[in-house]
Amino acid sequence: MKEIVVIGAGKIGSTIARMLAHSGDYRVCVVDRSAEQLQEVEKHDAISTAAIDITDRKALVGLLAGKFAVLSAAPFHLTVAIAEAAAEAGIHYLDLTEDVESTRQVKAIAAKANTAFIPQCGLAPGFISIVAYDLAKRFDKLESVRMRVGALPQYPSNALNYNLTWSTDGVINEYIEPCEAIVEGALVEVPAMEAREEFSLDGVTYEAFNTSGGLGTLCETLKDKVRTLNYKTIRYPGHAAIFKALLNDLGLRHRREVLKDILENALPTTTQDVVVIFVTVSGFRDGHLVQETYANKVYSGAVAGRMHSGIQITTAASICAVLDLVAEGKLPAKGFIRQEDIALDTFLANRFGHHYAQKNGSERAAS
């Protein structure tokens, strides 16, 4: 059994620990500074816990020493510290961050490390990049790559049409930070919450708008190869207008802790959600302009006998699948590894990646 450290005992971190422990191939230590949060982690023979301050470099490196890998489900501002500790301890590193600058620093750390560093292993960035690149490789010449993802309540019942299903810090960060994109062939930054659009899928109308981090490393990978590349978060109509008022008119973009407190005390959590994944790629094949689309919905469900939200399942399954591929020797054991370096078929064939299996003909391809 391989020894794994999972940092962060929140909704996603605890789900990762459960998935790995119940697989029978991993022994997991869940780390968090909150002893109260650690009490919520499932009691299992293959799961242990440790309460330490992640910013205590010496303590963290000591904990990581001798382990196979560390998986970070911690807030994005701790990403670099954990990556540096992994490099010092000489173990593999995987994270779920959507933060662009943190990923750039992880890449620099990986350049000097002797183990694998694989950031952005979640849903978006993460699985969405694997899907988009798989579609992009089918074209002789690319025109556009448009990626849309959203974790939505199945039964919206407030003005925001939203419930908290994952990291509040992550939501706020992606709604505020600049967004990478390729526009008319040029790599640019565009503002978050802008370029709103509407589309329908299975008879349901959604809105989508720019958010930060979802592209992962695809901008760099597809630079000079595509005219348009962008990522937008999916919500129900009306969400963007209200949230922009909170951020801009009330100035809460400059008071993130206040905004976080408001959201966590006003929006209930729910496990009854649906993850919508919608990727459209167009380009030329054999001289003809064609389009291919991947569309999928993943709902909440039971994992190892316990109900989990769709965003918990998809996010945890992604990073667990990538860890499995490293453990099986199907990914390089050293250096910086991009999500688009992972083959879609290989990912979906994995026991954790199988949670993304499409049902009821939900994949649609048009040309």
Image (cartoon, rainbow, N blue to C red):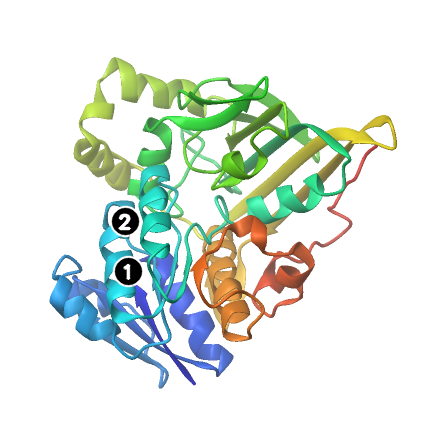
- Nearer to me, 142 or 114: 114
| Label annotation for residue 8 | 1
Q: From the top left corner, tell me how far across and down residue 62 is, in percent.
A: 18, 74
Which residue appears farthest toward the top when viewing the image? 249
- Nearer to me, 39 or 82: 82
> Is residue 202 visible to us here?
yes
* Count of numbered circles in the view: 2
Up-down relation of residue 360 to residue 18 (above or below): above
Q: Secondary structure at mark 1?
A: loop
| Marked residue nearer the N-terminal end (1 or 2) | 1
Image quarter in which the N terminus is found: bottom left
Residue at 18%, 67% in the rendered image = 60
Which three-letter amino acid code belongs to the residue tagged 2? Pro
Which three-letter amino acid code belongs to the residue tagged 1? Gly
Q: From the top left corner, tell me how far across and down residue 123 is, in percent.
A: 50, 49
Q: Secondary structure at mark 2?
A: loop
Q: CA distance from mark 1 to mark 2?
A: 8 Å
Which image quadrant is residue 239 in? top left
Residue located beneath label 2 in the image: 75
Residue at 52%, 55% in the rendered image = 314
> Is residue 209 visible to us here?
no
How packed mark 2 is, by other alpha carbons closer than 10 Å (few <14, some 14-19, many 20 or more), is some
Q: From the top left corner, tell me how far across and down residue 270 is, in percent.
A: 41, 49
Q: Are marks 1 and 2 in contact (CB under 8 Å)?
A: yes
| Left or right of 276, for residue 287 | right
Which image quadrant is residue 36 in? bottom left
| Left or right of 248, for residue 364 | right
Q: From the top left corner, tell me how far across and down residue 151 is, in percent.
A: 49, 42
Residue at 31%, 53% in the rendered image = 109
